Image (cartoon, grey):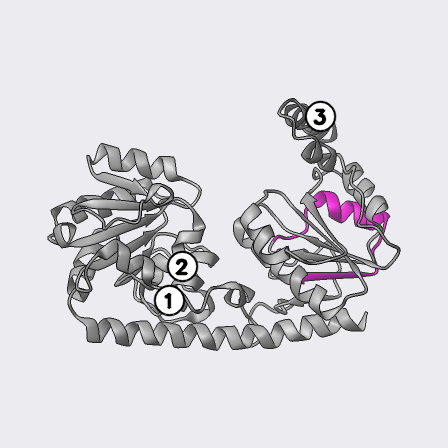
Amino acid sequence: MSSTKASLFSVIGADIKDRLKGNKSRANARLGLVNPPEGKSKLIWIRAGQSRDSVLLAAGLMAAIRHKRLDVRLVLTYEKEYQDVIIEQLSGLEKIGFGYACADTVSTELRMLKRLDPFAIIFAGKSASDGVIQALQKQPVKHILNFQSDAIKSLSVEASYPNISNIKQTENTFEAMTLLMQSQVDVQLGALLKGSETRELFLISSPVNRSKLDMVLENWKQSDLSNRAILCIYAGDAPDTVSEILDKKELKKKYFSQWDRETAANNEIFVIDEWRWFAATAASATAIHLLDYNQLTFWQSLASATVLSLDDGIKPTLGLDLPHHGEEKLVSYWESLSDNAFLCRKLGDENRRQFWSQRRLAQEQIDKLLQRVYDW
């Protein structure tokens, strides 16, 4: 069977499943059967991927463009929907449309291009796929931008933000995600959770690697910290995986989504099963450790003015200087920080300084992008 036929059958199969589940809008979008916002003004199509990072970047950019230009129509498509992101970033905006992306085939991409008839496309947080690249060769679009996404040699773009024409040059590198992080967070959540100013809270994110999380939890059980501090785990998209690991370790757990605002019991581990709890938890933590790199958790952690460490396998973005610790030594590192408020404050302040430095740089670059869009 040819790859074209295989992809066609895949699209049809997914379409049937969506319709059986009553998700007609997603099924129609998969086939490229979408309608643009009403009006005859120029249309800019912003394309995101399936990660929360990508959708947040794209939605944030859409809102920024709307404030810069009121005349154009804006469309955002994504591969996975995050309703909280859409509500937070796009509420109240006019002349916009948003919804699921079409399947990555030339025919569906061409159908989307003909229906939307965009004069500009911006790839946000996700590189252009083969289907859309081939479709654009048959039906070109006047303006194409890359925004926080990798360049594709087979796709000619007007500009990339950051400029990645020469990856050895880093002076224009920036992280737009810094502009979307909460820089001022109420620490009341931490106060309720701790119940005492002297009680400490440690946060780990995220449990992609089961063996590493298992090792951290084993050392946590053996440490005195487990009797006098609180451990929180950001579960990302895998709360069931975290729950399974905790159950095997016979550790008490509670989900933030089920939290009744009572003080955490001794030896009770809290699972952050919704992103909205992360910023407040991070701002209340003595220290945060990332088991894998994720833009959201990384930049929100830096913004929280909290001690931040990375797993040994993580290379910090933009060359930022941060401590690295393997899972076998992490709890010992936390013990060295415990009751050392001066050191924690010093390290946390430095992290926040680095965050604001990157945020200012990002704003400068975003302003250049928005000016380009304004000049179209």
- Residue 308: x and y in percent read 32, 64
Q: Which residue is nearer to you in this view: 209 or 289? A: 289
10 Å neighbourhood of mark 3: few (<14), some, or many (≥20)?
A: some
Q: Amino acid at mark 1?
A: Ser
Horizontal arrangement in the rendering, residue 133 relative to residue 300 (left or right): right
Residue, disc 1? 304
Q: Considering the numbered disc 3 on the image, is that residue within a helix, a strand or a loop?
A: helix
Q: Which residue is nearer to you in this view: 286 or 368? A: 286
Distance between mark 2 and mark 1 Cα atoms:
7 Å
Q: Amino acid at mark 3?
A: Ile
10 Å neighbourhood of mark 1: few (<14), some, or many (≥20)?
A: many
Quadrant of the rendered structure where residue 194 is?
A: bottom left
Query: Of circles 1 and 3, which is in front?
Result: 1
Q: Are marks 1 and 3 in contact (CB under 8 Å)?
A: no
Quadrant that contains the N terminus:
top right
Horizontal arrangement in the rendering, residue 271 relative to residue 96 (left or right): left
Residue 12 disc label: 3
- Residue 264: x and y in percent read 22, 49
Q: Amino acid at mark 2?
A: Ala
Sooner in the amino-acid sequence: mark 2 or mark 1: 2
Distance between mark 1 and mark 3 Cα atoms:
46 Å
Residue range corresponding to the magenta coloring: 126-146
Residue, disc 2? 279
